[in-house]
Amino acid sequence: MQVQSAAPEATPPVLERDGARATIRLNRPEHLNRLQAEDLDVLLDLFDRIEADSAIRVVVLTGTGRAFSAGYDLNSVAERAASAAEEESVGSSFEIVVNRLEDLALPTICRINGGVYGGSTDLALACDFRIGVDTGEMFMPAARLGLHYYKSGIARYVSRLGADNAKKLFLTAEKISAPEMLRIGYLTAMVPPESLDEEVDRLATLLAGNAPVAMAGMKRTINEIARGKLDEAAADQRARDSMRGAEIKEGVRAFAEKRPPKF
């Protein structure tokens, strides 16, 4: 008699450590890693824990099973939206999580192991890099559901993908395939499923070896420029501080000695 293996237990997002890398894994595979209301506080807590750990240099966000994520649980939204105040609370809670991910001081990689749908398209877009399988797909169903998406999410689409692509994805609610995701810039790289871990490992290792303070500062400046809200004085100060910091001393020394820097 053949014994069937038990399905993975569905849980809130889990944190895994591997050296300088932290991996956050969405873990409800039977429901395509659909995010529940209770998952949002867990994600915020994980972000805080990661930033407080100086040994972590890079973050990978991924899903368990055959999809990255089916987005936020619409049934949960409908049940909790009994009043305008509750509606606002539910929507803003998810928005807070996505914006917090975008503002993490560490470089972030989204390992898109399958389909990415609804709000999870914005969750992935909040990462600095998105590496996806060539069998993947995505769609944003807001127009089909009668939902006006929150403004910071729309702004992220526009700044990352351009107004025309944002309009196509939001207004048509059409599904697009991985090659199209790559063409419009949603994916940083597209690989066969068997090469996904290798490509994520390569990029994570590269990022983990670079200067963390310099990267954090430049990431912040890039994000502020993308939003049209650059704090020029603060960006100038970060640049001046880097010229006097320990990282540039080690970087120049390593370059002269023809060895990898040790930050």
Image (cartoon, helix red, strand yellow):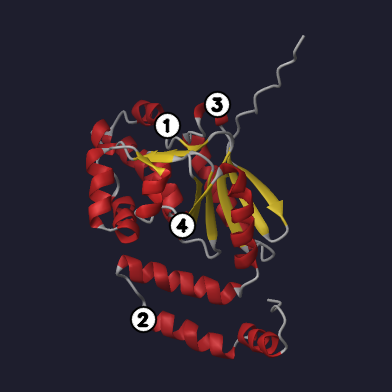
At label 3, counting other C-alpha atoms closer than 10 Å, the crowd grade (few under 14, some 14-19, many 20 or more) is some
Q: Which numbered dot is residue 43?
A: none
Q: Residue at x 31, y 61 (%)?
A: 159
Give the residue type that dot 4 points to: Thr
Q: Which numbered dot is residue 73?
A: 1
Q: Residue at x 34, y 67 (%)?
A: 226
Which of label 1 and label 4 is nearer to you?
A: 4
Rounded to the nearest angstrom, the CA distance separating label 3 from label 4 is 27 Å
Contact (Cβ within 8 Å) of mark 3 with mark 4: no
Rounded to the nearest angstrom, the CA distance separating label 3 from label 2 is 47 Å
Q: In the visual, does 19 lie left or right of 25? A: right
Specify whether residue 97 is in view.
Answer: no
Give the residue type that dot 2 points to: Glu
Name the residue that disc number 4 marks: 188
Contact (Cβ within 8 Å) of mark 3 with mark 2: no
Give the residue type that dot 1 points to: Asp
Provide residue 56's location: percent of width, then percent of height: 66, 62
Q: In the visual, does 110 lie left or right of 153? A: right
Name of the residue lying farthest toward the top: 1
Q: Which numbered dot is residue 30?
A: 3
Which of label 3 and label 4 is nearer to you?
A: 4
Rounded to the nearest angstrom, the CA distance separating label 4 from label 2 is 28 Å
At label 1, counting other C-alpha atoms closer than 10 Å, the crowd grade (few under 14, some 14-19, many 20 or more) is some
Name the residue that disc number 2 marks: 232
User: From what the image shows, is residue 46 above or below residue 176?
Assistant: below
At label 4, counting other C-alpha atoms closer than 10 Å, the crowd grade (few under 14, some 14-19, many 20 or more) is some
